[in-house]
Amino acid sequence: MSQQQSPSDVSIDEIPVDIANTQSGDVDASDVPEEIQSLTRALASTEPPTNPLVVLKAARWWYIHGKGGADPAFQWAVEWARHLATDTPSDVDQFDAFLEYLVAVGFADEKAALR
């Protein structure tokens, strides 16, 4: 039942976590696992996920591999999960910073392409 994992590569929910690259802040779109890319793109879409657990899965990955608590993708995912849980309006400025960040890391050439 127990599976051996190398100390530099563990997995959480079947998404690999590269310990050597945690909180490096240097994320490139090609480094993001397919499932997290899909969730991240969905968070930027006009029909984002409505399951807070799914949203927090993406938040966790960005927290670990991005800029920690300062990572815009992490911050937006947490903000969206808060919106889902409390049914209060989400922060438009935070969403805009999230889209700009996705362009900066290579998810799209411009923010409009993410929507």
Image (cartoon, rainbow, N blue to C red):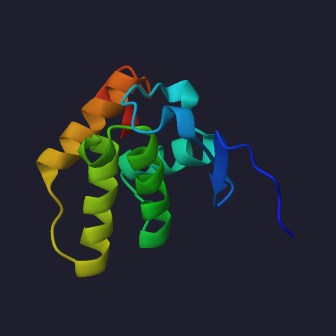
Left/right placement of residue 37 relative to residue 8 reads left
Q: Residue at x 66, y 42 (%)?
A: 9
Q: Assign the C terminus to one quadrant of the image.
A: top left
Give x and y (percent) for residue 114. 38, 36
For residue 22, above or below residue 36: above
As drawn, is 108 to the left or to the right of 80? right
Q: Position of residue 67 (x, y in %)?
A: 32, 38
Which sits in the foreground, 81 or 111?
A: 81
Query: Which percent across, then down, holds residue 113?
Result: 38, 30
Q: Residue furthest top?
A: 109
Res 81 → quadrant = bottom left
The residue positioned farthest toward the front in the image shown: 7
8 lies left or right of 109: right
Q: Position of residue 91 (x, y in %)?
A: 14, 56
Q: Residue at x 15, y 67 (%)?
A: 89
Foreground pick, 33 / 83: 33
